[in-house]
Amino acid sequence: MRISLRIPLLLFAFAFVVRLILAIAYPDPAYPDSYYYVDVGRSLATGHGFSVDFIWVFAEVGGKIPAVPVLPIPSNAHWLPLASIIQAGFTTVFGSSPLMTAMPMVIIGSLTAPLVWLIARDAGLRTSVGIGAGLLAAAPGAGAAFMSQPENFGILQPLVAATIFLVARGLKGDARAYALAGLLVGLASLARNDGIFLGLTTALIFFYDRIRSIRSHGLIAPKIPFRSAVICFGLYLLVMAPWWARQFAVFGSISPTASSGDALWIRTMQEWNSLTAQPSIAKFLDQGIAQIVQVRVLGLVAAIANFSVIIGSIVLVPFMVMGAWRHRHTTDFQPWFVHAIVVFLAAAIIYPVHVPGGAFIHSAIGLSGHAYILALEGVLAAVGWMAARRPRWDAGRAGSIFVTAVVVFVLALVPVYALGVQRTWDESRQPRIAVAAALDRLGVGMDERILSIDAAGIKYWTGRGGIVTPDDPLDTIEAVARAYHPRWLIVERDDAAAVLGPLLQGTMVRPTWIGPPSFAVPGAHGSLPDLALYPICTVSGDDRCSEPVLATP
């Protein structure tokens, strides 16, 4: 038994060390999703429940300024809670430092490496393929930097791979494995909205199994018993029902932003962060069939590009294609093929507008485990083709050498990708650290609200709640300010509502409710400031908008 456990334990250790190093190098959340999960996790850990004292997008409060604009608000009208729940439990025990926030994702995600080895072993593939694919899954190319982020990547990578593995086992006659898949689908769906696509894949495999049996006229018996499908669905409901009950009780819908149309019917990303757009199916159809098709084609292209870069590191893509062709009829991979088709079509049809912004990366990470096995199988296929034309070659030995070379080459790219990604994140992080210190020097109270493009991120860095600046005309932003009475406005050079860009550039006539800058982070070589802080005066007697209040950097 010690010998049989050695490989999976070493793979787990490798994955853990790689992800821990990445987490130490950049322990903080880096973008709105992960900021949000951390903020909710901290709220849970401190006994405030599912609530946040900021609005990161107005879709969370019905897509308009509420009749009674208040903070805090119930959280998770759009994003799902599993990452926050896991973080809350972990940080309650070990503390809420950034590293401890990321640690549960490091541990959970590291399970993927031995899991991928097990999948390859169960499929009867070479040991070198299983080990190599496990190593690649431990540090998935350009996606490796995301694996230590305190959000869903570390959760979805093993959950999706394990679900597909169990469904494939079901197709081979393991009824209990198929039933258990429902539990994992539920967890994936509790982690992210597109977990439902994993459930669709699981259901499609059941129907495929039945149809195959019917078309054989009884020569092929169904591999997945009906009772297994019932148990599978029951376990899914067991996981999701409590959360649906909470959503319905709080928001009147189990999926508020989908049922309202705010997430489904947007035509551009600007509409996602707009109060005046008011997405609807009628407006969606008004854009015309040509525009609808064009956006979906571009969404599919973006999804393929994301997968090719993030997972395939480009160089693995042709080998993945060869491996997929080699195993196109292999039962162990049929559920993966179905799931790949489902998630790519979903990206193209359901949420193509979100794909260029990175929404598909989560689905790509879920596909990675089996994809790496297929890539190394493709390497063996290519070596076999060459060996057949070179009599002196030992095909087996040559295959192992080439598999090792490919794995080493791709892993060598990981630090290059990771450093580049983390450098970009840090360029956004440093100005926020600076403005947090400036707010403290100015004596700004922790209860003073801030208007910004990333309210979740500003909450994380400054500890102060606030409201997103909608991507709308200035009078709409002013209406938000007068509704919620934020005391400060933060404008960032690389991410700001379009109408506020000229404010940072100094080419805009400043409205009377926005004061002169109180603090700015200078840009490099005399360019525009990276970030500027302005007072907002919407309450009678607030005279800060007439005279500058400067904070020394």
Image (cartoon, rainbow, N blue to C red):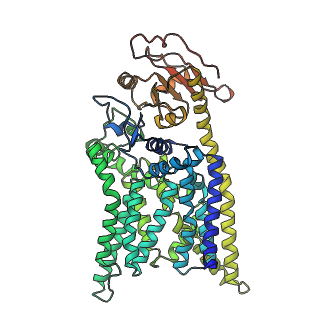
Q: In the displayed image of the protein, which residue is found farthest to the bottom?
A: 219
Placement of 42 over or under 148, stated as above or below: above
The image shows residue 402 at horizontal and vertical percentages of 68, 73
The image shows residue 333 at horizontal and vertical percentages of 47, 74
Q: In the rendered image, which quarter contains the N terminus?
A: bottom right
Q: Which residue is depicted at the point 42% across and 54% down? A: 191
Q: Which residue is depicted at the point 38% across and 76% down? A: 176
> Does the rendering let one see residue 235?
yes
Q: In the rendered picture of this protein, how many numbered marks are placed on residues?
A: 0
The image shows residue 189 at horizontal and vertical percentages of 39, 57
Q: Nearer the viewer, residue 488 or 414?
A: 488
Q: Which residue is depicted at the point 47% across and 41% down? A: 39
Placement of 84 over or under 370, stated as above or below: above
The image shows residue 447 at horizontal and vertical percentages of 46, 26
Taking the image as shown, residue 491 lies to the left or right of residue 181, namely: right
Taking the image as shown, residue 185 lies to the left or right of residue 321, namely: left
Q: Nearer the viewer, residue 417 or 98?
A: 98
> Does the rendering let one see residue 379?
no
Taking the image as shown, residue 180 lies to the left or right of residue 309, namely: left
